């Protein structure tokens, strides 16, 4: 004959049934829910035998009720902060409520310990790290992007403009040419390598030249005066015809000196004439 195995309260036989052991007593689930279950500190309902129960300092919660009082984040498997007033908060909300908690690990920053304070917030020194490389900032300079903090090298690598010439970050200064950023020291004449920041220059086939090098090495020669056509100053406007180029002010009738820019003209060998003078030649 099998020994009886009964509920402590209702004496129902527990063989083959689900039961709960409470204070060394075997209790059926019905009696447990009615007589033994702890009350949830949040919803005030019994935490039944079929519910997962969490407890902290003699207080009890359903698993789904154990949430941050501020943001409602579930805390069953997360670090949490139990306040003196009984409120349960996630680490982030707790640190916002309590100024002496680290913004990274949410633990208390003890008085006298190495710490960093920035915009009325506090971190342990080892917790104040670069968002990119994760290394502590310590005494280095740092920059922010939104809520994230970066050491200077990581910020430059991730966000700084890259020089059009050398492709390296421009950390300070620099110039812009044709909507492209350059280091000042990279913006130099193609021929003589003289710095062009703040100086007159011109470009040819994606290269930049100082005025002197452009005149001697690149510029076309005027078919009239034989001097370089630089595009600077008085020589800005140019006339081109059958492979030859002239300063606009040099494109004149050989005989009467009438300017022939935007007018009819006659070419006679190397010479240019207006129609009237061409008839007389």
Image: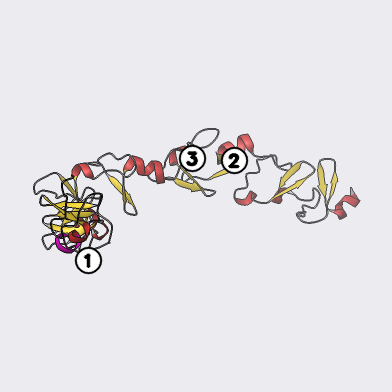
Report whether residue 120 is seen. Answer: no
The residue carrying mark 2 is: 206
Instruction: Point out the stretch of residues depicted in magenta.
Output: 33-40
> Which residue is located at x 77 percent, y 56 percent?
262
Quadrant position of the N terminus in the picture: top left
User: Cβ–Cβ below 8 Å for labels 2 and 3?
Assistant: no
Disc 2, disc 1: CB below 8 Å? no
> Dot 1, crowdedness within 10 Å: few (<14), some or many (≥20)?
few
Please indicate whether residue 251 sits to the left or right of residue 281 in the image. Answer: left
Q: Distance between the residues labelled 2 and 3?
A: 12 Å
Q: What residue is drawn where x is 75% and y is 49%? A: 251
Say if the magenta span includes residue 34: yes
Q: Residue at x 54, y 48 (%)?
A: 178
Furthest residue toward right: 279
- Residue, far front: 1
Which residue occupies the foreground of this view, 114 or 186? 114
Q: Which of marks 2 and 1 is in front?
A: 1
Among all residues in the image, which is located at the extreme left?
A: 112
Is label 1 or label 3 in front? Answer: 1
Q: What element carries label 2?
A: loop
Disc 1 target residue: 43
Looking at the picture, the colour scheme in use is: secondary structure
| Residue at point 49%, 45% (across, down) | 199
Please say if 231 is above or below 60: above
Residue corresponding to mark 3: 187
Sequence-wise, the earlier of marks 1 and 3 is: 1
């Amino acid at each position: 004959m099998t020994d009886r195995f009964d509920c402590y309260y209702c004496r129902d036989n527990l063989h083959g049934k689900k039961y709960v052991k409470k204070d060394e007593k075997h209790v059926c689930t019905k009696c447990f829910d009615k007589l033994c279950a702890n009350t949830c500190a949040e919803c005030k309902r019994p935490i039944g035998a079929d519910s997962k129960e969490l407890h902290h300092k003699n207080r009890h919660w359903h698993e789904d009720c154990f949430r941050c009082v501020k943001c409602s984040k579930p805390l069953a498997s997360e670090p949490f902060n139990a306040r003196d007033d009984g409120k349960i908060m996630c680490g982030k909300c707790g640190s916002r409520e309590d100024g002496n908690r680290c913004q990274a690990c949410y633990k208390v920053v003890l008085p006298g310990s190495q710490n960093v304070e920035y915009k009325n917030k506090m971190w342990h020194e080892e917790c104040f790290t670069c968002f990119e490389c994760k290394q502590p900032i310590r005494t280095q300079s740092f920059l922010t992007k939104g809520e994230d903090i970066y050491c200077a090298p990581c910020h430059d690598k991730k966000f700084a403009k890259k020089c059009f010439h050398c492709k390296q970050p421009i950390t300070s200064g620099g110039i812009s040419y044709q909507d492209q950023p350059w280091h000042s020291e990279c913006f130099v004449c193609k021929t003589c390598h003289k710095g062009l920041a703040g100086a007159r220059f011109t470009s040819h086939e994606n290269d930049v030249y100082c005025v002197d090098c452009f005149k001697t090495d690149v510029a076309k020669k005027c078919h009239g005066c034989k001097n370089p056509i630089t595009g600077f100053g008085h020589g800005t406007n140019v006339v081109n015809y059958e492979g030859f180029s002239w300063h606009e002010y040099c494109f004149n009738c050989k005989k009467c000196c009438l300017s022939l820019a935007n007018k009819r003209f006659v070419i006679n060998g190397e010479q240019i004439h207006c129609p009237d003078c061409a008839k007389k030649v």
